[in-house]
Image (cartoon, helix red, strand yellow):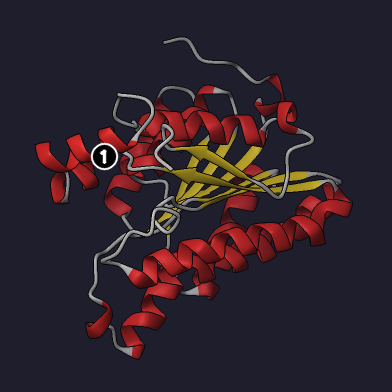
Amino acid sequence: MSFATYPSLKDAAVYVTGGASGIGADIVRAFADQGSRVGFVDLDAENGVALANELSAAGNNVHFKACDLRDIDALKSSFKALESAIGPAAVLVNNAARDDRHAWDEVTPDYYDDRIATLIRHMFFAIQAVAPGMIAAGKGSIINFGSNSWMEGQGGMPVYTSSKAGVHGLTRSFARDLGQHRIRVNTVVPGWVMTERQKKLWVTPESLAAALERQCLPDPIEPVYLARMVLFLASDDAAMCTANNYMVEAGSI
């Protein structure tokens, strides 16, 4: 399959959260392939270092900082380090999340607060951290990751689904507040993406068949297709795209 090249992304400074594995790793690779300067953060230091070393050895400008995004001071410190390495962010991809399953009647206040910190709180403060640089530049693109799980009324993880529903409000609010500075804010909405984590924990022949039956398109959704949508929204090609949801779920809703 042949994919597009976006000249506006060459040398652009891109920050990605949760970039060490899964969809995030494909996003990091995709921007590196465009010639972007890429900085990414993740709690998974082992895979983060390995990915950064691999891409750097191939001649790409890629930097990794290990970071627990639940710690906002650590997030800000990591972003400062990335700024020193590759410059202020022109693009922010708020990708990091964990879709851990949990029963509603077993959720404690501490677990709830931890999930919120893992799923959406860091997005707000990541935007807050990069927005001044984008305002100074007079433009920028912020891409938040949502989920179609709450749209489908999926059960079994209510803190996750409610957090992902909140991402859409976050996007629209920041799109309004930052739009005067030509900063675009959008949400990418994945369907069930076949990452290694999903395959290891939840994909079975039966569950995959049921998912494909709900989709209009008959093929499993691979991480690369999410990365391609992110590239488009980050590029100048999407200059008039903001405050909206961009679905990559093969027509399952």
Q: State whether residue 205 is above or below residue 74.
A: above
Circle 1: is it few (<14), some (14-19), or many (20+) Cα within 10 Å? some
Number of marks in the image?
1
Quadrant position of the C terminus in the picture: top left
* Image: 12 above or below 79: above
Residue at the (66%, 28%) spot, across then down: 9
* Residue lying at the far left of the rendered structure: 205
Task: Give the position of the N terminus as an image quadrant.
Answer: top left
Residue 113 or residue 205, whichever sits in front = 205
Lateral position of residue 14 relative to residue 217, left or right: right
Q: Within the image, what quadrant is residue 250 found in?
A: top left
Q: Which element type, helix, strand or loop, lies under badge 1?
A: helix
Q: Residue furthest top?
A: 2
Decide which of 234, 132 is in the foreground and name it.
234
Counting from the top left corner in percent of width and height, residue 86 is at: 63, 43
Say whether residue 204 is visible. Answer: no
The part of the image, by quadrant, that contains residue 103 is bottom left
Q: Is residue 183 visible?
A: yes
Depth order, front residue of 164/90? 164
What is the x, y in percent for residue 191? 39, 42
Q: Which residue is mark 1?
A: 211
The one of 168 and 26 positioned closer to us in this rendering? 168
Q: Amino acid at mark 1?
A: Ala
Q: Residue at x 78, y 51 (%)?
A: 134
Q: Residue furthest bottom?
A: 109
**Could you say where residue 97 lies in the image, as x and y percent from the top left?**
40, 58
- Residue 209 in percent (x, y) is at 18, 35
Question: Is residue 79 rendered to the left or right of residue 74?
Answer: right
46 sits to left or right of 140: left
